[in-house]
Structure formats: C-alpha cells, structure tokens
Image (cartoon, rainbow, N blue to C red):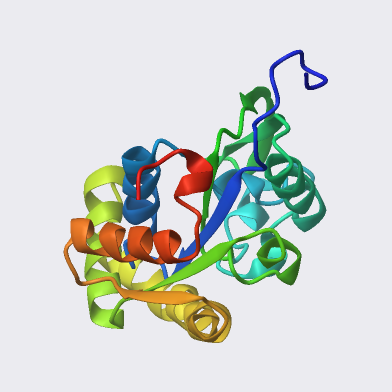
Amino acid sequence: MSEAGTPRLPFPPVMVGISGASGSGKTTLAAELARTLGGLHFSLDTYYRDLSHLPMEERARVNFDDPAMIELPLLAGHIEALSQGKPILRPGYSFAEYIRLSEQNERIEPGPLVVVEGLFALYFSELRAFYQLSVYVDTADDLCFQRRLKRDVEERGREPESVRRQYEATVRPCGLAFVRPLADVADLSVDGADQLDFKVEQIRNTMKRRGLLSRIGTPS
C-alpha cells in the first residue's frame, strides 16, 4: 500500500514527454494520447512562478515564453513523485493575475501512463530523465501563428494586432531559442500538420516497439 492508503501500481508509471512550439498542437495531441490509452494528461501550465510580489503592471510585462519562468524545483519534484506512482498536489495558477492559487491545489493520481506536456516539457534535463519516451511536435511557424491567433481571439477575447505583436516580440523568438532545438533531443518527431489520429498511432507504435504498451495494460 502507498502512504495514501491506495494500492501501488504493479509497475512504475510509463512517462511520456511531449513538447512543441506554441500553436504546434502538442496539447491536443497529449490529451488525445492520454484519452486513447487511458492515461493522465499532465500539463505544465500551472508551474509558472508566482508573481504576487510584483505590481500588476510589472507582472503583465513578464515574458512567459522564457523557461526561467517555470518553477523547476517544484515541477521536477512532482514529476519524480508521479514517476514513482505517488500522488501530488498540483498547484493552481491564475493567468489573469499571474499568481499561485493555493486554494485551487489539485490532488493528482498518476495511473499507469502519464503524458507530460508543455512548451518546456523536454527543455529541462531534470524532467527528461524520467521519460521512457519523448516526443516533439514539429509544426511550421505560419501554422503555429494561425492557430494561436484563432485561439487568442476566439477564446481569450484579444485583438488580432495585439496577438501579432506578442508573437513577433516574444513567442516566436523564444520558440526559436528554447523550443525548436528540442527536436534534437526527442526520441520521436511528429508532423503537427498531420491528422490527429495518425500522430497518436505513430506514438502508439513507438511505445509498442519499446514494450511500453504492455506495461500500461494496453493490448499490443
């Protein structure tokens, strides 16, 4: 039995890391892979640093496309715990105020498969050490921008010109500097323009070759 009183998994969870530029389709892919294989989709979006000590106007100027904004010790500790089959309390985060929300902490149970996803899921060697498979979603820059523009205008109520300015000022330069090079450290690259089910099947086939499907109880 675990410390929480729940049975331990027969094997440590299979850990899959998925990264790609903003708008690459990594979040949709990670969610679908987790759904298809009965795993946990674990986004890194709530691990940004708490900026409550700064005035609001300063918080709004912070570049969240820089990996330095990730609270790595907390994140790495949580990924390590999940890799050992232990539950964690994932922090809550307000992107409207750029602050940590302790009242929204969420208990997360790992299950047999954990799909870790985010801009910097493959950036930190501290995280890559826990993955049995790392995946990079390679998507052309113009398609990434069109997807981000659509999302920010339709879902976040932003003006198109504001989205364009931010993309050119920080999103694209940081993507080129910090995220695009991650294709070289990934075990598998998939084309972000391909159909979702095809990308899932590519990852599934790679997991099968590595003997990972049997570990999560999925027929090969």
Answer above or below: position of 30 versus 219: below
* Residue occupying image coordinates x 60% and y 37%: 93
Where residue 36 appears, x then y in whole percent? 31, 42
Answer above or below: position of 212 versus 101: below
Where residue 54 appears, x then y in whole percent? 75, 49
Q: Is residue 95 visible?
A: no
* Camera-side residue of 172 and 19: 19
Q: Is residue 18 left or right of residue 92?
A: left
* Residue occupying image coordinates x 78% and y 22%: 2
Q: Is residue 42 left or right of residue 59?
A: left
List the single residue furthest toward the top: 5
* Camera-side residue of 2 and 43: 2
Q: Is residue 75 visible?
A: yes
Where residue 51 appears, x then y in whole percent? 72, 48
* Residue occupying image coordinates x 36% and y 49%: 33
* Camera-side residue of 65 and 125: 125
Quadrant assignment for the N terminus: top right
